Amino acid sequence: MSPELSDIQGLIHHHYGYPKLRHLLFKIGSPASGRQLLKFLAPRVTHAAMNLDPGPDVLLNVGITFAGLQSLKLDLDLLACFPIDFKEAPDSTVMGDVGASHPDRWWKGFTDANLVVHLFARSTETLEAITSEVREAAAGNTEILPTSAGGPIEGGMLGTIRGELHFGYRDGISHPDVRWSDDPGSPGSIDYRNFLLGYSTPQIPSSPKVFASVPASARATGLARNGSYSVFRVLIQNVAAFNQFLAAEGPRAFPELPPTDAQELLAAKLMGRWRDGTPLIRSPVAPDIAFANDNSFNYSQDAAGLRCPISAHIRVTNPRDQALDPPPKVIGVPQVIRRGAPFGTKLEGTVDDNQERGLAGLFICSSITRQFYTLMEWMKENSFSPSFQDPRAQDPLANHEVPSASKEFLIPTESGVRSVTLPNMVTTRGTAFFLLPSLTAINRLAGDDRI
C-alpha cells in the first residue's frame, strides 16, 4: 500500500525551507463562513506530490481544531470517533507548562483558534499578497492576532545561515527517515503510519479507525485518512539569559579552556551538537564541518555520556539505541515530524532588549499521546531510561519551573561529573492541536452537504 501523495498536505512530507512564513489563526464565525474560507483555500493547498524544485513563490497549508470541526456542524456520531487527546485542551501538566509557561500566561486568544493557515513565501511581497487574499476570503470569521504586539505569528530566516535558531544552533538536521510506501525495497526506515491517519494497525494504532460495531467510524476514518495531527507550539526564548548563562557557567564548568571555547563547549553539551550541527558523538572536542549534517549515529559507544551528556536535548528527544524502560511504559522511541521557524529579531550579547523572540514549531504525528506527550514527559523529567544518573534531571531546553525536577545539568567527564544550574530560558506562549486534513477531506469539509 502506498498513500497517494497528491492527497497529503505538503507540510507533512516536505521540509519547505522558505525564508518567510506567517501563521494566520481564525475563529470560525458560522458553518457557512467556515466552509466558504475552506472553499477558497482548497485549490491553493500545497500537496506532497508537488514539485518544489524550484517550487512556487507561495506555499499554503491548513489545519483545523476539533472545535473547528464542531463549528462546521459535523455529525455528532462522526465527531465522537476522534481521540480524546485531540478533543481536549492540551494537558499543561504533561507538557510541564507551569509557572511562567502556564496556560494562563499564554498569548491571548491562541487557544480560541479553530483554523490555521500556514503561509510560506519567497519574499515579503508575495507573503503580503497571499495574506490579503486569505483575509478577504475569511470574511465572516474572526482573525486572532495573538502576539503581545497584536499581530499574527510570523518568522523566517534570522540571517544568512539557513536553519539558524535564536540560541545560535542550526535546526532542520535531524528528520525521521519516513518510508512512504509498503512496497518492498521502498526507501526509508520509519513507517508512514506514525504520521498519517487512516492506516491504523495493531502495531501502530491511530484514531479514528474503523470499528465494525460503529458505522460512523468508517466515515470518520475516511475523513481523517491521509491527514495528520499537528501540535502547534509557540515558545519564547530568552536569548540574553542564555548568553549570560554560557558566559558565567562555561568557564566554571571547563576552567581548563579559554572562556570563549568553554562557552561553546557548554552550548554543545546542552544540545548534544555543536552550534554548526556537528554531533558530539562524532567530534567531542571541536566542530567538524564533515559531520555538520550527520544524523547516522548512536549512543551505545557513549553509555556514560562522556561525549554527549545523557540529558542533552537531542539525546533526550531521540535516545536512538540507548536502553529504555520495557513495555508497556515505553515502546520504542516516539518519532514526530518537526516543522517550524524562529520569530522575532536576532539578538547577540547578554543585554536584554525586552523584545519577544522564539520558535513557532509544528510537531506532526498520528498519536498526540503516544508521540508528542511522551516526548514532553521525557523532556520534563528524564526518568524514562535506566541510563540516567539522576531520574529527576531535565532536558536543558525544558521549562525549569517544574517543582519535582532537578535544575542541575550533569556533564560526565574523565575526571568526574561536573554540573551547572539551569536557569529558565524557554517559556511557552501557546499550544493547540490541529488536524492537517487531506485534500479530499478539505474539499469535503468545504462542501455544502452535511458530512
Image: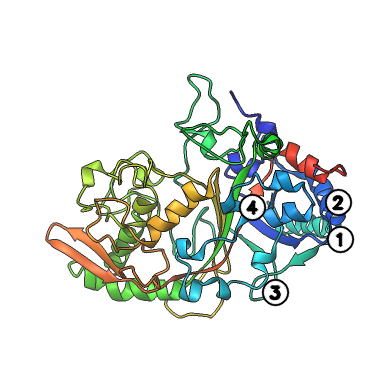
Q: Are marks 3 and 1 in contact (CB under 8 Å)?
A: no
Q: Secondary structure at mark 3?
A: loop
Report the number of discs. 4
Estimate the x, y position of residue 114 in percent, counting from the top left: 71, 58
**Residue shown at 75% from the left, 62% from the top:** 27
* Mark-to-mark CA distance, 3 and 1: 19 Å
Quadrant in which the N terminus is drawn: top right
The crowding category of the residue bearing disc 1, from other C-alpha atoms within 10 Å (few below 14, some 14 to 19, many at least 20), is some
Dot label at residue 36:
2
The secondary structure type at the circle numbered 2 is helix
Residues under numbered marks 2 and 1 in contact, where contact means CB atoms less than 8 Å apart: yes
First reached walking from the N terminus: tag 3 or tag 1: 1
Image mark for residue 434 = 4
Q: Amino acid at mark 3?
A: Gly
Q: CA distance from mark 1 to mark 4?
A: 21 Å
User: Looking at the picture, how far across and down is residue 330, in whole percent?
Assistant: 37, 45
Name the residue type under label 1: Ala
Distance, label 2 to label 4, CA atoms, is: 19 Å
Residue at image mark 1: 139
Mark 2 neighbour class, 10 Å CA radius: few under 14, some 14 to 19, many 20 or more: many
Q: Earlier in the sequence, mark 2 or mark 1?
A: 2
Question: Is residue 257 something that shows in the picture?
Answer: no
User: Where residue 150 is drawn, which disc sits there?
Assistant: 3
